[in-house]
Amino acid sequence: MNIELRPSGGRGEYELAGRQGELHVQDLFGLAMFIEILPEVAINAYSNCVLKDGKPRIRLTHVARNAHPSSLIAAAMLLPKPRREKHETHGANLLNWEQFVVQTVRIDVSPRADGVLICPLTVRLENGDGVRLDISFAERMARVVRVWTAAATLTSELALNVRAHAAAFTSSISTQTQLVSSFMALHDALNRPTGDMLPLIEAQLGLGALGAPSVGAISAEIGDDDFIEEVHVNPAEARVERVRQWRLAAVRGSSASAFRRNVREAYNSRCMFSGQRLPRTEATSTAGVDAAHILPWSRFDLDGIKNGLCLNKQCHWAFDEGLLRLSFDASSRAYLISIPNRLRLAAQTAQFDMQSFDSFAGLVPRNRLPANEALWPSAQYLTELNRFLDN
């Protein structure tokens, strides 16, 4: 499903288009919208979708300037402020203040008790000169959350404004005014730059950029297929894929390199699931084990060892896909590996060879864990992840 900017006079109107599995646009009419900024972290968009002039228009339920869902998504990503009047946006450099529109946001949607969760996946920016830029929401937000983390221990004016932005966009009770004002205050703290804010913040906080997409061209990793309106994946499967994409985004950058090194050292290059020890050797350029994130978002200690597992390539894939689940039993202080019934049934239908994965199921021997118990995988993080995947 997509959020689309449609022509309507000079300004343009945002609409919902397409479907998510069995959910169609008309199933969402009148439901309050919440935007998933990070997994398990959503803000109130103060909007809903209504049928207006025969079209599924997105409307604000509480009027506040510059608080449309597309603008809030851009503000969370620390993009420059967009417009809705595409014909008034120009220039070869797309990421300039009020010189682009958020043309399309590819989203997953998932019903919740108080409305519907809107989960951005990819964002397409355009201007009136035909310049286009496609951005992965997870990759951009991975940079944003590292900025949030870096600012948490600093006291400069910029850091304080970054922290206010983080507080606003990770709170379910933030008002429209708080969301917009936190973004605008950060812009003011940077002396109102005309271009992209995020690289400026990264530089001032001493962080290296994590590979922003080139301006003026479509990202090589994102194409038109990433904006298809009709998606047949159900919300449960979509949740697993979103976590996988967040993990892919989390493994990039200099801090992620340290994370990989520290996790391998803590586990002595031994796979927690299989028990295999696969260090780098004189004959191999890399180790046979990866550092896998449990929760790929910084509010839960993005690059701390307790948020990591040492896994071989096969087990890392299986964990990311949700095929192998890890949980912690507090009474015995033991970790358990299991295979969800839904995935087991799907594997049987596809004649997928489960024998090796079945051999991993059960109690994890303690000699596969870090010698320092303080570095064991966080029970809280595992519980949070499994709850997210089960909802």
Image (spheres, rainbow, N blue to C red):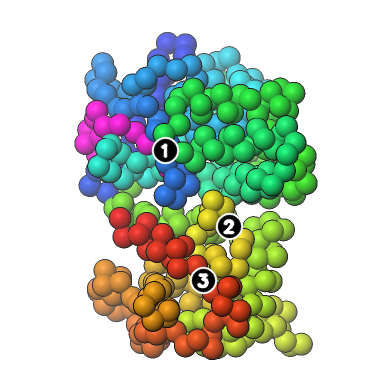
**Residue 370 image-quadrant placement:** bottom right
Alpha carbon distance from label 1 to label 3: 27 Å
Identity, as a three-letter code, of the amino acid under mark 2: Leu
Which is more foreground, mark 1 or mark 2? 1
Quarter holding the C terminus is bottom left
Q: Residue at left 72%, top 79%?
A: 285
Q: Residue at left 67%, top 71%?
A: 262
Alpha carbon distance from label 2 to label 3: 13 Å
Evaluate whether residue 288 shows in this view.
no
* Secondary structure found at label 2: loop
Quarter holding the N terminus is top left
Identity, as a three-letter code, of the amino acid under mark 3: Pro
Decide whether residue 33 is among the magenta residues: yes
Q: Which segment is the magenta one? A: 24-36
Residue 173: x %, y % from top left = 41, 34
Residue 273: x %, y % from top left = 47, 82
Q: Is residue 209 above or below residue 163?
A: below
Residue under circle 1? 172
Evaluate whether residue 355 shows in this view.
yes
Residue under circle 3? 377
* Secondary structure found at label 3: loop
Q: Residue at left 51%, top 71%?
A: 377
